[in-house]
Image (cartoon, rainbow, N blue to C red):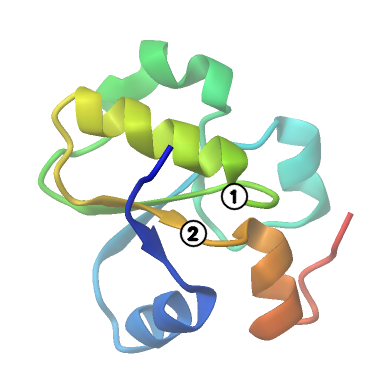
């Protein structure tokens, strides 16, 4: 499944520049408690019921541990009418590896 992706370095640069990106974390609560980068937590299984919590006008970056669930979230959101949505390539693991080693890996 091919979905739009953003690299962790680009996300960091855009966040540092003050761009209004909406981070959507689709992991489970226990994972979010271990490490997160401040996104709204909506586990992937809850996304269909909670999609109304998201603004279709904002650019959404979906993220998970390694990228697979984020890609599923992006595919779902695109079908639901979101045009500005991308997956964080490599997920929070890549963020920890290449941007901020203080973010715990699990």
Nearest the camera: 43 or 90?
90
From the image, tell me which residue sits under label 1.
Answer: 67
Q: Residue at x 23, y 33 (%)?
A: 78
Q: Most extreme residue toward the top, as rendered? A: 49
Calculate the distance from the C-alpha at mark 1 to the C-alpha at mark 2.
Answer: 6 Å
The correct choice, above or below, for 45 with respect to 10 in the image is above
Mark 1 or 2, nearer chain start: 1
Is 18 on the left or on the right of 97, as rendered? left
Q: Residue at x 34, y 26 (%)?
A: 76
The correct choice, above or below, for 9 with respect to 93 in the image is below
Label 1: how many residues lie within 10 Å, few (<14), some (14-19) or many (20+)?
A: many
From the image, tell me which residue sits under label 2.
Answer: 88
The correct choice, above or below, for 53 with respect to 36 in the image is above
Q: Residue at x 22, y 24 (%)?
A: 79
Element at badge 1? loop
Residue 47 quadrant: top left
Do the numbered discs 1 and 2 sit on residues whose CB atoms are within 8 Å?
Answer: yes
Tell me the quarter of the image containing the N terminus: top left
Residue 100 in view in this figure: no
Residue 27 quadrant: top right
Report x, y in % for residue 21: 30, 63
């Amino acid at each position: 499944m091919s979905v739009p992706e953003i690299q962790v370095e680009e996300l960091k640069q855009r966040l540092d520049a003050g761009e209004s990106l909406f981070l959507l974390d689709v992991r489970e609560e226990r994972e979010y408690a271990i490490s997160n980068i401040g996104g709204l937590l909506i586990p992937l299984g809850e996304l269909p019921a909670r999609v109304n919590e998201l603004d279709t006008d904002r650019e959404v970056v979906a993220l998970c541990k390694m990228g697979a669930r984020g890609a599923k979230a992006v595919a779902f959101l695109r079908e639901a009418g979101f045009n500005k949505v991308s997956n964080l390539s490599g997920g929070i693991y890549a963020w920890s590896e290449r941007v901020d080693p203080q973010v715990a890996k699990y």
